[in-house]
Image (cartoon, grey):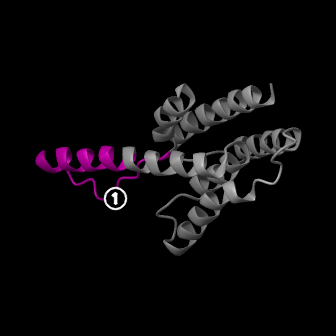
Amino acid sequence: MVEQLNCIIFGMFLFAAAWEDGRKKSISIWLLLSGGAAGIVLCLLQSEDCFKLTGCLVGLALLAVSKLSKESVGTGDGCFFIISGLFLPDLSNLILFFYGLSLSGIFCGLFFLLNRVKGIDVGKERIPFIPFLVPVWLIMVMK
């Protein structure tokens, strides 16, 4: 029962974050706080594995990269993956990150090449990352 609730609430958090990131290229602090609070409550309700800090390491690493690269990687992406670590097992969080990164890399490469052919410079364009996680998560849920 708690696992299904965990999946539903994480899905709602992911869709809301993807929508906001896609529209505003940022995620509000209120969405992150509410997702984090829900993740902590659900983590406490799961009796077998309450200590999920290893799942949050992906987000901590992204926050470190964000600080080192002067936010070429968004801080919101790091915060999102810290919170997703509360919902997902550590391996699932890594899979979500790497497949989402692969999908966004393919999209950005095609976006760059197509605009280069048209003579448009999109070198400084910022592409939101969280929306690329939605199809990856849907595939993970269907398996």
Q: Where, quadrant-wise, is the N terminus in this rendering?
A: top right
Q: Is 78 covered by the magenta stretch?
A: no
Residue 25 seen in the figure: no
Residue ID at (45%, 40%): 132
- Identify the amino acid type marked 1: Lys
Q: Is 121 covered by the magenta stretch?
A: yes
Residue ID at (59%, 65%): 61
The residue identified by callout 1 is 124
Circle 1 SS class? loop
Q: Is residue 99 left or right of residue 114?
A: right
Residue ID at (24%, 45%): 110
Q: Is residue 72 left or right of residue 29?
A: left
Q: Is residue 50 left or right of residue 130?
A: right
Residue 97 at x, y percent in the picture: 51, 50
Between 46 and 68, the residue placed more toward the observer is 46
Residue 95 at x, y percent in the picture: 52, 47
The mark total stands at 1
Q: Give the extent of the magenta segment.
A: 104-129
Q: With respect to residue 68, does 91 lie above or below?
A: above
Question: Label 1 crowding class (10 Å Cα cut-off): few <14, some 14-19, many 20+?
Answer: few
Residue 32 seen in the figure: yes
Between 74 and 5, the residue placed more toward the observer is 5
Residue 136 at x, y percent in the picture: 48, 37
Residue ID at (61%, 45%): 27
